[in-house]
């Protein structure tokens, strides 16, 4: 089996960077990246400037259009499909109650993945999404992920998942994401693992447990998912743990705790050189930043006219050097509570992180996004991306799996 990849929702190429770093023969045969509603496709341009564009089987360039418009039959054959599918609907920016999940506008892109798997019969899949995917929607907890499991089950896949916080596995950023690994029952990997108990796969031998070691003192819970997606949409509810597996419709899940690994701190990735004056916080803006980062209690009125008190605690200001950073969002560098503010190494004054530091937090080469896009978009693309080292680590396990295929 060849190490060929189709990278969906490719952004600036986080999966590709993570896999190619291994130098073990991974080759991307097609990708898709299109930002809805944007007149200038900065991420696609950045991706192409690093890797070049690729024609589909009909000889057309379709990598930069809405994936829904792509004829799935024209996607080149591949062994592995990867993708961090758009997560706005589950994003931490919304409360769980207001997140629309699979029924939301962008969440429906799951059906594009489903169409591709149906058309291409891809043997292996690796997807990424925000952690709340497992809980969405609030009114029918676990339904959205249940629908995905049901789809994958109906197409003959076994599915493992894990919520991974990159900082717990040696990265400089606390970024908690759900990773989903699926393999088809026509692979050797299925044949060699089908006798292993679901519990052993979950805790020790599986794709995630062997790559990111865990322990679990919590009960192992079991459930079932049928191949009938409509049924799942209407009735399914399940409390998915942060680690789990679904095989033949049987779900086994638990709350896992990572084995301790030494984290890299924010201080380690900060610039040693002089940083441009434009990144520093002016005396004039300091009160606003102090307010945003501080504790507050504000009286608000709900849409229905009820008065309530909104309160939030303080967050570290500036962000400490001796810990991994907080999660980077697409709004990084804007006047926002979640934007990182650090003490500059040379001047000891407070400043924003630079686009290069944002790239380092996600494990990209310095200046990866310095391909002509505005500075604001460089932060945006990094907020959308993933910690590439996590993919490199998964890639090592994938190397062993693919080497054992015919
Ligand atoms: C969460 S980001 C993934 C980023 C990527 N993993 C990286 O390393 O940069 C999702 C990406 O999907 C893209 N996208 C959203 N809707 C799309 C569509 N209909 N077709 C193709 N790409 C789409 C967005 O522009 C965004 O870059």
Image: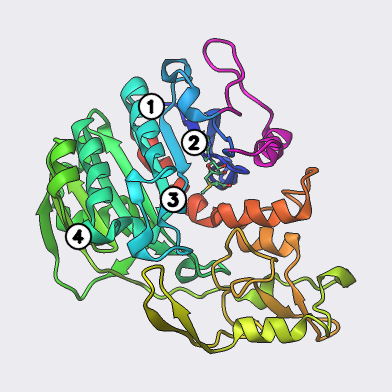
Q: Is residue 194 visible?
A: yes
The mark total stands at: 4
Q: Earlier in the sequence, mark 1 or mark 2?
A: 2
Give the mark, 2 or 3, whose residue is nearer the N terminus. 2
Q: Residues within 10 Å of mark 2 (few under 14, many from 20)?
A: many
Q: Residue 303 is drawn in which quadrant?
A: bottom left
In the displayed structure, 23 sits above or below 210; it is: above
Left or right, 275 with reference to 127: right
Place of residue 85 in the rendered image (x, y in percent of width and height, measured from the top left) = 45, 44
Q: For the magenta stretch, what is the residue range?
A: 37-65
Q: CA distance from mark 4 to mark 3?
A: 20 Å
| Pointers 1 and 2 in contact (C-beta within 8 Å) | yes
Pointer 3 residue:
394
Checking the image for residue 8, the label placed there is: 2
Residue that extends furthest to the top in the rendered view of this protein: 58
Q: Position of residue 49 (x, y in %)?
A: 73, 35
Q: Sequence-wise, which precedes: disc 4 or disc 3? A: 4
Residue denoted by label 1: 116
Closer-to-camera residue (233/386): 233
Q: Locate residue 127 relative to residue 340 in the image: left or right.
A: left
């Amino acid at each position: 089996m060849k190490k060929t990849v189709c990278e969906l929702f490719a952004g600036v190429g986080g999966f590709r960077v993570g896999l190619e770093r291994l130098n073990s023969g991974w080759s991307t045969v097609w990708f898709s990246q299109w930002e809805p509603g944007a007149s200038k496709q900065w991420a696609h341009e950045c991706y192409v400037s690093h890797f070049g564009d690729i024609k589909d089987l009909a000889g057309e360039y379709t990598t930069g259009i809405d994936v829904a418009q792509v004829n799935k039959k024209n996607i080149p054959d591949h062994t592995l499909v990867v993708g961090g599918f758009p997560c706005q609907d589950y994003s931490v920016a919304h409360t769980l109650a207001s997140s629309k999940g699979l029924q939301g506008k962008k969440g429906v892109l799951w059906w594009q993945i489903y169409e591709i798997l149906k058309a291409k019969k891809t043997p292996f899949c690796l997807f990424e999404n925000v952690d709340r995917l497992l809980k969405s929607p609030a009114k029918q907890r676990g339904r959205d992920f249940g629908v995905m499991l049901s789809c994958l089950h109906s197409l003959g896949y076994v599915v493992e998942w894990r919520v991974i916080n990159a900082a717990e596995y040696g990265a400089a950023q606390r970024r908690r994401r759900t990773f989903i690994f699926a393999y088809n029952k026509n692979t050797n990997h299925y044949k060699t693992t089908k006798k292993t108990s679901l519990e052993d796969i979950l805790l020790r031998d599986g794709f995630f447990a062997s790559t990111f070691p865990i322990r679990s003192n919590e009960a192992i819970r079991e459930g079932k998912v049928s191949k009938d997606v409509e049924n799942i949409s209407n009735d399914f509810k399940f409390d998915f743990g942060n680690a789990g597996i679904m095989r033949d419709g049987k779900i086994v899940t638990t709350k896992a705790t990572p084995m301790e690994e030494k984290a890299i701190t924010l201080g380690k990735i900060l610039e040693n050189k002089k940083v441009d004056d434009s990144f520093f916080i002016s005396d004039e803006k300091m009160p606003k930043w102090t307010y945003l980062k501080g504790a507050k209690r504000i009286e608000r009125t709900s849409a229905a006219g009820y008065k309530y008190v909104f309160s939030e605690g303080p967050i570290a200001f500036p962000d400490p050097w001796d810990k991994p950073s907080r999660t980077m969002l697409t709004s990084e560098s804007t006047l926002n509570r979640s934007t990182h503010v650090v003490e500059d190494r040379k001047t000891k004054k407070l400043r924003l992180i630079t686009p290069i530091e944002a790239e380092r937090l996600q494990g990209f080469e310095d200046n990866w996004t310095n391909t002509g896009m505005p500075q604001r978009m460089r932060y945006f693309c990094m907020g959308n991306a993933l910690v590439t080292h996590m993919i490199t680590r998964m890639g090592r396990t994938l190397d062993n799996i693919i080497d054992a295929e015919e």
